Amino acid sequence: MRLSNYICGNWVLGKGDEIPVLDSVTGQVVAISDTSGLDLGLATDYARTVGYKNLSALTFYDRGQLLKKIALYLLERKQKYYELSYRTGATKVDSWVDIEGGFGTFFTYSGLAKRMLPNTTFWVETGVEKLSAEGSHLGLHILTPSEGVSVQINAYNFPVWGMMEKLSTSLLAGVPSIVKPATPGCYLTHAVFQDIIGSGLLPEGALQLVCGDPGNLLEYVQDGDSVLFTGSASTGRKLKSMPQIAGSTVRFNMEADSLNCSILGPDAKVGTPEFDLFIREVRNEITTKAGQKCTAIRRILVPEDQVEAVQKALSSALDQVPIGNPLNKQTRMGAIAGKEQLDTLKEKIQLLAGGSELIYEGKHQLIDADFTNGSFITPRLFFNPRPLESDISHETEAFGPVATIMPYTDAEQAVSIARKGKGSLVASVVSNNTAFASEVAWRLATTHGRIYILNRDNAQEGTGHGSPLPTMMHGGPGRAGGGEELGGLKGLHFFLQKTAVQGSPDMLRAVSKIHIPGAQYRFTQVHPFQLHFEEIQVGDSLQTANRTITEADIVNFSNVSWDHFYAHTDSTSLTGTIFDRVVAHGYFLLSAAAGLFVSGKKGPVIANYGLEDASFFKPVYAGDTIGVFLTAKEKINRGVKGRNIPSGVVKWLVEVYNQRNELVCVATILTLVAKKSPFIALNSITLKKVLETLSESSTPRWGLMTPQNMVEHLEHFVHLSMGRETVDEQANLDSEQLDRLKDWLYKHKPISQGLKYPGLPLESNAPLKYKDLSSAKKALIKSFEDFSVYYNEVPEAQHPHPLFGPINKEMWELFHAKHVTYHFNQFGILD
């Protein structure tokens, strides 16, 4: 199989410099990599122009939705990725981490985008800076996609996760990328990448693939571009010093060699849960991915009186790990990525042997494999008795199932030994002693990117020493490269340009699409709570009537809330306080404000979603009068799951003033606001107006129905929803299918054209019920009026639908809106 490259929107084969990519288990050729003859300068230009234009034009929310759709698309095809992954030497568990762990990163960032990022092409950082005395000149910061291409050079150990974790942030940030996987295992990266492109979900130019040797790719990077590199520190330093990178403003992120350590606490003696956890964790980190993890444990730090016990227990644990062909279900450790990587590993083992003692070498018999053809090696343990004097264990990373045990005397010495790694991705501390763990943790923080503390309390849900998580920073100082990846939304900052914007409140509101205090209010004729999500504009405002606070209000709120704090109830206890007399509760003021600004009439506002940034500036006493300004501050689009009405979040600025026009309270409330339905409103006025355009001569755009058949058909379903008529034939669907269908009712998705329900005649119309079309129209309108009365009297009633089964009033209403819209569109009377 010759692997093609994806350049400038086309799959392109190399010109003949073929590199065979081998099966790590059998040594057989799996694929041919060839990147020769590619116009990589054209590829970078294409990304900066076509790719950047298309990707950065999408909002953060839209890009987050793309990540989710891509992950779902790939998840449906995961089995073929597993089959290829086994050929890289990865076991099923290893492959799960690589493949589904990679997809999980996309899911995580999609969720972060939905919950925390705006539905705009830029991102406004929280906080407005007051730059003038009167507040007419303010400042804020915005983040926009860096105008360039991201070149992503990945290591061979995780062909899928390595690509997905970088793309999750670059795609969400809106920056196009060129992916360059390591040659070993690149056929797996290629398979996943090919399906990403094949999904058709991404805009043109968003992604390109150089599947193998990078050639002169980095010679074409320029100001505004970025390079992300995962690999050896020596290679990373060479790349970073290239004139095109060092001599320009190309952003460079490196994740390199890391001599990670795990420290066994002095309290974790043999027989304690922590001792067993430590042995299990170290064994897993040595054998998972055959030790080919940038976060694997290389240095094992144990109290000097525990060395023998740890050596014995760990050797026994490693003996029990079956090694061999990942296709055999018994296998728990697979092969090294390739013969070249195996030779390098053996060289590093020889270096370690020169400065430390080999105390364990596995004598495993391979399962369905052999050492000659496959790239296999058994685990090794070394012992360095003088870790503060002998540096070989702190300078040599054997990238495989190899680690070194080192003794320490106390916490201070353990920290000193750990720091000799000169910067690592992760250190773990296994202890149930809070004093020891806390002292070691904070002292290790300056030289480690992540610290994992494990004990009996978090063991069941612990994610493991070697598992980078999307919401936690992945990277480390010093030898580890000094880079940062992931870390939740902070991971996007590498790809974004931060810009300070200064101006008047109105100008900043226009730029940021967020209401800025001091900007002009825009009063609406309709109460803001009667507007749908799409209709609300940032800056829409309401000024309420006033309310005078009474002593009875304060007393009643104390009794209802049980908040009998002395400042609200005891006027004799106010000496030495900031209050002159009994003061109204802050939360009463918010409640009273809500009473002033809410609209009692049912409308698009579904629920109060939260409260943020509540502050109280002036005391309010009995006799004071308050009024409220309510302003739409920010809109956040959101997806919905299950049986929830499509909606968005609106943040409202609540400003409470007293009779002296003094600001006494400010808060931000969050409301869920329904989006405008694309379906017809089922009230008599609307139905009558639309039906007036339907005549006997109206012809359907599809189907056999006559106008009167259609109207009577709709009335039949309204009668079904009240139990006046019965279902002739019920669809035979399982519970999972029914759940999906009922979820569909809540989505703004129309009925598919030509959909047939059980019991409906396929080739003919049902007999007519009324004498003419006019009578049928009146009956339909009357049936909807009856529907409203019926469910007012029996709101909990449920009646069967031929497709959905028994459903309640809300579901029937949602169905009728879709159903009526479908058939009115059938006759073109909604145009």
Image (tube, grey):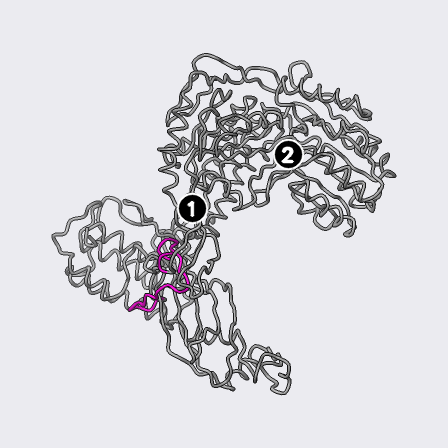
Rendered view: 699 above or below 604? above
The kind of residue tagged 1 is: Phe
Residue 748's x, y, as percent? 35, 52
Residue nearest the viewer, comparing 7 with 252: 252
Rendered view: 193 above or below 704? above
- Residue extent of the magenta highlight: 506-528
Q: Is residue 66 left or right of residue 765?
A: right
The kind of residue tagged 2 is: Ala
Q: Residue furthest left?
A: 697
**Quadrant of res 231:** top right
Residue nearest the viewer, comparing 774 with 3: 3
Query: Mark 1 falls on what kind of element?
Result: helix
Pointer 1: what residue?
60
For residue 654, the mark is none
Pointer 2: what residue?
480
Residue 83 appears in view: no
Rendered view: 67 above or below 395? below
Residue 13's x, y, as percent? 42, 18
Crowding around mark 1 (Cα neighbors within 10 Å: few <14, some 14 to 19, many 20+) is many
Q: Is residue 697 left or right of residue 105?
A: left
Residue 341's x, y, as percent? 64, 20
Query: Magenta stretch: residue 509 in it?
Result: yes
Pointer 1 or 2: first along the chain: 1
All told, the count of numbered labels is 2
CB-based contact (under 8 Å), mark 1 and mark 2: no
**Quadrant of res 703:** top left
